[in-house]
Image (cartoon, rainbow, N blue to C red):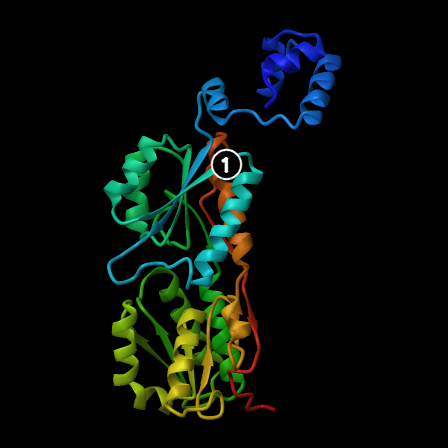
Amino acid sequence: MVRIKDIAKEAGVSPTTVSNVIHGNTKKVSKANIDKIQRILEKNQYIPSMSALMLAENRSRLIGVLIGEREGKRRSIASDPFTSVILNSLELEIYRQNYYMLFHLANSQEESWKLATTWKVEGLITLGLSSEENLELSEKCQIPLVSIDNYYGEEKVANIGLQDFEGGYAMGRFLAEEGHKDILFLADNDVGVDHERWLGVQKAVGEYGAKGAVAGRKIMPENRELRKAWLEDNLEELKSRDVLFFASDFYALEAIHFLQDKGIEIPRDVSVAGFDDSPYAEICRPEITTVRQNIMKKGQEAVKRLTSLIQGEEFKGQERLPVEVVIRDSVKRKRL
């Protein structure tokens, strides 16, 4: 492997000059020498030592990515396409910004704090932590932090999320205008993201639904095994509704398989809608009518916001990315 002193010998300069060019300290280096050294570096495919860069710049260039993990509700990278897609987006953008990603499934605040301090990460991106957990973590770590998909009473933590209310409203309007009168919204909680989506559905059905149209809501268990039992216990009610609108495509897909196993045809007997437009939505049969979000962009924007905070730029608070309804085959088109 080529060394700095080998580059210096070939360029006819000192090793210190080569080191300065590698680390961007070029104020006292002539343009001719900079160009010459860079050509030699490229020719030899020189890759600087990460540890040397960290020592030279007195910084880690590490960004911590924490994904919340709770008992009974582990975010699986293998089975949850939303998590895998957003992790891919984060890693690509972090690398593009000349940082490195340190990923961890966070079981507790103490664990997250120890990771941030032990590895001296320059900033944190969190997914699946509550607003309260993010506020506490930000206060404790005292480093830039950007959360994904949270709501805060006051803008104390930067956040990249969606127009969740607008997404629920758009789907509620579509379903109501199609003539569906009995719409059931299903989620595993009633806070933040899912609460806003429910409020959107309610408002749209109230404004665009025919006389007698109603929007109801059910909270399902977070634990998958408990959720299977819940679906079984609530089968009669589920199949009596016009539309089951789930807060995620994962839950919509799970319900479609469950109902089909019971001999219920989608959408002939009951319509099903989701939220996210994850890869599952198109490979499912029937394909899922859903609310599309740009998951890759969400990850990219989270990294861009964090790096701007690391560089000392102004705190900008919350950003909500746009969404749109994608019409496929899982919802009966009554107007047609």
What residue is shown at x 38% (from left), y 54% (from top)? Answer: 150
Judge by depth and name the residue closer to the eye, 139 or 76: 76
- Residue 304 visible, this orientation: no
Pick the residue in front: 206 or 289: 289
Outermost residue, right direction? 32
Q: Residues within 10 Å of mark 1 (few under 14, many from 20)?
A: many
Image coords of residue 115 (percent x, y): 32, 37
Q: Which residue is mark 1?
A: 307
Q: Residue furthest front?
A: 1
**Picture quarter with the N terminus:** top right
The x and y percentages for residue 52 are: 49, 21
Q: Secondary structure at mark 1?
A: helix
Tell me which residue sits at (58%, 90%) in the image: 335
Quadrant containing the C terminus in the rendered view: bottom right
Q: Is residue 182 left or right of residue 285?
A: left
Q: Nearer the viewer, residue 75 or 212?
A: 75
85 is higher (above) or lower (below) than 111: below
Q: Is residue 133 above or below residue 63?
A: below
Judged left or right of residue 190, residue 165 is: right
Examine the image and state in which quarter residue 29 appears. Answer: top right
Q: Is residue 300 visible?
A: yes
For residue 316, above or below residue 82: above
Where is residue 212 shown, x and y percent of the image?
A: 40, 90
Q: Is residue 7 above or below residue 226?
A: above
Viewer-proximal residue, 199 or 104? 104
Residue positioned 37% across, 30% down in the render: 120
Residue shown at 32% from the left, 62% from the top: 191
- Residue 272: quarter of image: bottom left
Task: Residue 232 in the image: state x and y as whole percent.
Answer: 28, 84
Three-letter amino acid code at the position of disc 1: Thr
